[in-house]
Image (cartoon, coloured by chain):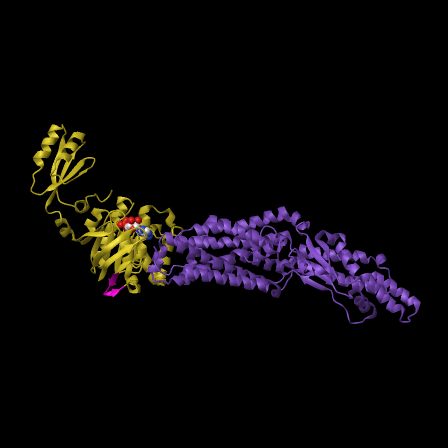
Amino acid sequence: MILQIVKKQALILLRNRMELLLLFGLPIILITILSSALSTWMESGEIEINLKVALIEQNNEEDEINQFISEFENSGIPPEAVEKMKETASVIAPVTLIKDAFRSAEVNEMVELVRIDPSEKEAALDDDSYSAVIEIPENFTYDTLKSVMLNEQNKAEMKIYQNEEQEIGANIINQLLSVIQEQLTFGTFLAENGIDPNVTGVEDSEMPGAAAIVDTKESVSSKGYYTIGMAVMNVLFMATAIGSISFKEKTSHVFDRIVLANMSRWIYFIGVLLTGMLFALVQLMIVFGFAWIAFDVDWPSVGSFILVTLAISLAVGGLAVLLTALSYRVNSEMIISFFSSIIVTFMAVLGGSFFPIGESSSVIAFLGNLTPNGAGMSAYLALLRGDGLLDISQYIIYIFLFALVAIIIGELSFPKKGVS
Amino acid sequence: MLELMDLTKTFKHTEAVKNVNMFIEKGEIVGLLGPNGAGKSTAISMLSSLVEPTSGDVRFRNKSMIKNPQSLREVLGLVPQEIALYEDLTALENLKFFGRIYGLKGQQLQNKIEEVLDQIGLYERRKEVVKTFSGGMKRRLNIGVAMLHNPEIMIMDEPTVGIDPQSRNYILETVKRLNEEKQMTVIYTSHYMEEVEFLCDRIYIMDKGNLIASGTKDEIKQILSSENSISIKADRWNDEFIKRLQDIPTIQRMKVEEKEITIVVPKDLNMFAAVAKIADESKLELRSIDIKAPTLEDVFLHLTGRALRD
Ligand SMILES: Nc1ncnc2c1ncn2[C@@H]1O[C@H](COP(=O)(O)OP(=O)(O)O)[C@@H](O)[C@H]1O
Ligand SMILES: [Mg+2]
């Protein structure tokens, strides 16, 4: 029985040339146009909005270096050795290194480092405009010098508070800091071996480091970005298409015939759900298949990709059945046309289909991920960047939950009795 | 076999059906007659379990169908007033889908579909999309779909609205044949007198939600036994003739058409001479004056004071 409903819905959709063109052709056209028109903009880095990072210094670098050196001088080591230590220590100066890294041209373009008085720490943590807050604890310099030069283990850690709502921003800062970390060890190695870092170009090696960060951003090409953006947007129209077809069954009184055939409403309901899901799946596969062939948008992990795609398809099925139920309930197609003309656009913009809107504000990023398309987009983007299933599990779970809620609301609002 | 008991349906602002009682016996064709908005479709929707009555009961084989209409639905074929078809699918695809949801499949479905296609005269066009059909063809398919599961009771809601006379005759003949050959019980709704007169054994007449008359054709016409309908024919009318007819107090009702005027007068009154005299004085040449056998149209006019198709 359910199969009959699905088969018939499919047949109707396939007969509808215009609808098909819109559902399958439009996203492909849009991907092509958007990705070529906007690729320069996307890849020029302009899209990487200014991240702000707060730096709180609880330590005084100079004092601690002096403290370290004077302890050395008093330990009875030969003066030449002390002299060498002094040089190395001034080169290593870890806090300066961090500041310099942030001030280098490449990083400075993306990240603004704001020095904050320790008394303002709490305020900085609450301030959402910071992607991260870095706190240099007391004795950080002293301990770091001891650790890297004397191999002592009591190393003081700098604390990094990530702003979870600005995930991408926080990730960038993290990567940047790990580059600095490497820098520090490398610098130590050079200094210990009496090589002047300025000569070997350690300063320059910051650049590949910074470039590596830019690279990870660029690894999602504009084609990849817009493939995902258009796919997750246009798949929403599948829900409205199926909703329309179903509502037409009510207005044309075909639904009366279905009821009279003693078919349970719930069979019909499930039929609509499955049709929405199945066709969303087909649509996504066609769009991504096209992008794969034409634009080389391929997925590092096909399994995860399919899981995300299934989740989105189920959410679309849920939306289809929700729209159907609501239109049956209020006996008007208004809600479906409102959804397809306004809500979809709104959700698409919010979800980042047209540009990475979420990077401009953590609130918008959060709201964007509340839309199934936005959550799907975040998951897809993460996959393209090489993230694993675990990294995107929160999105997948959310999309499944969204689908479940849509289905339940649909079930509750679908009229239990009476038709005409 | 099938009974409507004190059936009432009130929509937000309209009392569509008010305390209607009807019964339908096996094998008969029952007509439900009434102008647009009389409440026929609402009554039929309640009868076929699509609309829940505000009060009253629908009983089938002495069981209430309000809560558990399954047994009625199984034997019921409904031809809705609207074309309830998938316009984007072909005739064959429509028949297949509706056949399957009634549980038909395989060869049995195949055979039944061919039989129905023959009956509704659409075999040649079965592979064409319904959208491209004429109104008459859609109506016929609308009926065909309701016949797939061999229903014992066929409910037809104005199945001939808006179609050409040929298709209309075809449909009427088909209904008559189904009744005669398969003893199918038929409930036929219409606002065309001729159809109901041609098809039905018994008739219910509705107006403004009320059942205003019921009985066999003859019984209903008996309502008019105290009256005569007189038909006056001419090529054209003039104002004076019409005005003077209107002034005659014994004429109870009068209907003016292009070439015919019908007046209703008490039976024992001879109007011939009077009418001829008025025609002569107003210089109008008459073609004929006849006493007409009463029609259902007259009955309706009598009962409501209005023509059926205003
Ligand atoms: N779903 C509805 N909601 C509100 N009013 C309705 C509805 N269906 C019918 N009506 C009203 O009930 C009355 C009877 O309608 P209907 O049963 O369709 O008459 P008929 O079939 O004899 O033309 C009309 O006044 C119509 O406007
Ligand atoms: Mg009607």
Residue A21 shows in the view: no
Which secondary structure class fits the magenta region best? strand
Q: Position of residue B10 (x, y in %)?
A: 29, 54
**Colour that chain A carries in the picture:** purple
Question: Would residue A13 appear left or right of B61 to someone viewing this image?
Answer: right
Question: Would residue B269 appear left or right of A315 to someone viewing this image?
Answer: left
In which quadrant will I find the N terminus of chain B?
bottom left
Tell me which segment is drawn in magenta.
B57-64
The quadrant holding residue A408 is bottom left
The quadrant holding residue A291 is bottom right
Q: Position of residue A311 (x, y in %)?
A: 53, 62
In which quadrant will I find the C terminus of chain B?
top left
Q: Which chain is yellow?
A: B
Residue B57 shows in the view: yes
For this rendering, which residue is in front, B2 or A158?
A: A158
Q: Position of residue B186 (x, y in %)?
A: 23, 56
Is B64 rendered above or below residue B279?
Answer: below
Q: Residue furthest front?
A: A119
Residue at 34% across, 52% down: B84
Is A339 rendered above or below residue B73?
Answer: above
Question: Would residue A18 appear left or right of A294 to someone viewing this image?
Answer: left
Residue B60 is inside the magenta segment:
yes
Residue at 76% across, 59% down: A98
Q: Position of residue B21 (x, y in %)?
A: 21, 57
Residue at 72% across, 55% down: A114
For this rendering, which residue is in front, A192 or B160?
A: A192
Residue B135 is inside the magenta segment:
no
For this rendering, which residue is in front, B288 or A113?
A: A113
